[in-house]
Image (cartoon, rainbow, N blue to C red):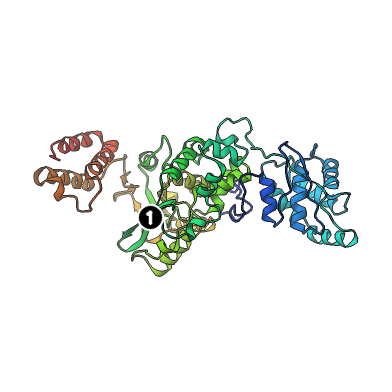
Amino acid sequence: MRRLPGEADDAGSASSSPGLPRGTKIDQATTPQEANRASHGTPPAPTDESPGSRLQARSVHPTPPHVAAALADAFLAAPSWNASGLREAAAVCLGGPRRFVVPVVGHVLRAHHRPPRDAPRELSRRILDSPGFAEAVERSARRLPLTIASWRVEPPSSRNPDDRGMLGLATVTDLARALGTDSSRLAWFADTKLWNRRAPAGPLHHYRYEWRARPGRVPRLLEVPQGLLKGMQRTVLDELLDRLPLNDAAHGFVPGRSAVTGAALHTGQEVVIGLDLVSFFARVPARKVYSVFRQAGLPEAVAHTLTGLCTHSVPPRILSLMPPGGSPDERFALRRALALPHLPQGSPTSPMLANLAVRRLDSRLAGWATSVGAVYTRYADDLAFSGGSALASRVDAFVRGVDRIVTDEGYSLNVRKTRVRRRGVRQTVTGIVVNETTGFGRREYDAVKAELHNCVVKGPGTQDARGHPDYRAHLLGRIAWVTALNPGRGARLRREFDRIRW
């Protein structure tokens, strides 16, 4: 991947998944290896209940994908991960030695120094992509009919076998048990075949939807999961996602960090640059979510199911209700993103998964900022950079570099929300003034104070112009925000609030 000068050395270290986790039907009563064979159009062989049992699956004239899948399972079941062990396992699988196996074994051992027991599908794809594999299989079959004589399957394993929590899950059945359900019910909630998107409107849909119009801007869609699905997602957040490491630049939805901690890093700088990502959650696709779970060490089938559980594809009937706002290009881009599996804005797992999915973006932007002695932080979709004279003298070039990195990572900047504030004017980050120290803006404070005064004099019903469902909680939230930045001002506002007659 092309990197710009000054990017962090580890910017490209977080590899993405070798393919979309969707589209392969997984029967939760079988092993992930059997599901892999199903994806190649081959019915799984009968199995007994003993681990590592030999599954007879005689098939004459199998296709190259079929052979690759069988060899992948045979290699993973081999007693030793070396050239002789893999060649012997292939001979048992194919009913005898085949010349095309030798270069395949070398290709596999160069790519995997130890058996990838959590990734049979990845190993199958690697075998299939071996140089000349498909042609060699077809040539070998012309000389001597090719047969899958034995299909041996080993149970999958996590890369964290000693972990007693969700990071140690090995099978989809284990995942279902951890979420308090069974495999069939979990498959329905994960909806990896997107049945929910094509189903007619009714009470069995997993999400409810609410469009939010924004004057002059593209509207926003809230996708809120229903009770049982939301509970499962909350368990995934608490037991799994909160344990994964994040980039230090992320300050949104992270325990121990906040908008205040992020803004505090930008105080007293010569220039502050604010940028905004377009449709942040909708632009995080299923493949990046799948990559997060795979990088955490979870087996393919478990990562596949978790991806379905935490992503969503919006039905066409909901997209057709999009309210006015935004340019035609922006509206088209949003519809396309929402129609594909993405992180739903409204799910408890989406903020943390978004932080995890953009770790490489954060690393690259942090390296780009460091090249000019600048500081970088991100709060959800708000990017903030600040620095001294080196940054102030090349703001335009710096922003163009940020745009190239963001575009290269699959996102885009909202150019209309680009903000450059130099010393001498009010500098803000996520709504917090950062000129000298973090503080709440005087105008914003006066506005909250006036609203509370009017509630005391005229009653709270006259001030709720936007029709908040809980106006009292709304006011308390605004007061709490002021208190976090200026406890003295927050205390004065709270005293005024206590005078309101509800």
Q: Quadrant of the C terminus?
A: top left
Residue 212 locus on image (x, y percent): 33, 57
Q: Quadrant of the N terminus?
A: bottom right
Find numbered disc 1 in the image and state the secondary structure of the residue it sits on.
strand
In the figure, residue 259 lies in which quadrant?
top left
Residue 429 locus on image (x, y percent): 35, 47
In the figure, residue 112 lies in which quadrant?
top right
Left or right of 84 in this view: 39: left
Residue closer to the observer: 410 or 160: 160
Q: Residues within 10 Å of mark 1 (few under 14, many from 20)?
A: few
Residue corresponding to mark 1:
209
As displayed, is residue 378 above or below residue 61? above
* Residue at left offset 41%, top offset 41%: 253
Left or right of 25 in this view: 206: left
Residue closer to the observer: 11 or 15: 15
Residue 355 locus on image (x, y percent): 48, 45
Left or right of 42 in this view: 215: left
